[in-house]
Amino acid sequence: MVLDWFSNLLRFFLLLPLVLADPRRAREAMRGHWRTAIGVGLLSPLSYILVLAALRQGAPLSLVAPMREMSMMVGALMGMLILREPVGPARLAGCGVLAAGVILLSAS
């Protein structure tokens, strides 16, 4: 949890100069996105908390860690399906390799 809080604190201090330099531009950029930003901010620690809970219940780290990294794959696929983002063959192959690796780790 401490790592997650420090990561958020670092992001805050990295973005602060940009906001202070042009507060009007920052407000314009956030217009209509406040709910999403607050939701992400509140839910982002949840993945880390779930990892810690799984490890505490005895799940092997060799399976939990790759499963957590599948969020990148899910994000890429959701971007492709929902936002109609272009996804090249390399990204699709990466998603397939990641899924296959998790399946192989869970089978062993």
Image: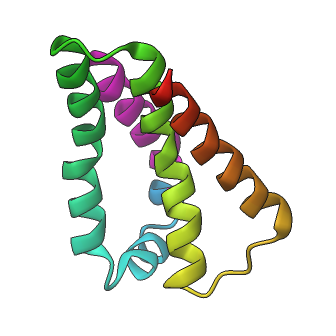
The residue shown at (35%, 19%) is: 3
Against 101, residue 3 (above or below) is above
* Lateral position of residue 77 relative to residue 56, left or right: right
Which residue is at the far front? 107
Against 17, residue 62 (above or below) is above
Displayed quadrant of residue 36? bottom left
* Lateral position of residue 61 relative to residue 32, left or right: right
Against 81, residue 78 (above or below) is above
* Lateral position of residue 71 relative to residue 98, left or right: left
The residue shown at (73%, 63%) is: 92
Residue 1 is at least partly visible in this image: no
Displayed quadrant of residue 95? bottom right
Q: Position of residue 58 (x, y in %)?
A: 22, 11
The residue shown at (44%, 31%) is: 10
Against 107, residue 91 (above or below) is below
Whether the magenta-drawn stretch holds residue 52 is answered as no
The residue shown at (55%, 74%) is: 79
Q: Position of residue 103 (x, y in %)?
A: 52, 38
* Quadrant the N terminus occupies: top left
* Lateral position of residue 72 relative to residue 53, left or right: right
Which residues are drawn in magenta?
1-18
Q: How many marks?
A: 0
Displayed quadrant of residue 12? top left
Q: Magenta stretch mostly in which secondary structure? A: helix
Q: Position of residue 55 (x, y in %)?
A: 25, 16
Residue 34 is at least partly visible in this image: yes
Q: Position of residue 70 (x, y in %)?
A: 50, 45
Frontmost residue, 2 versus 86: 86
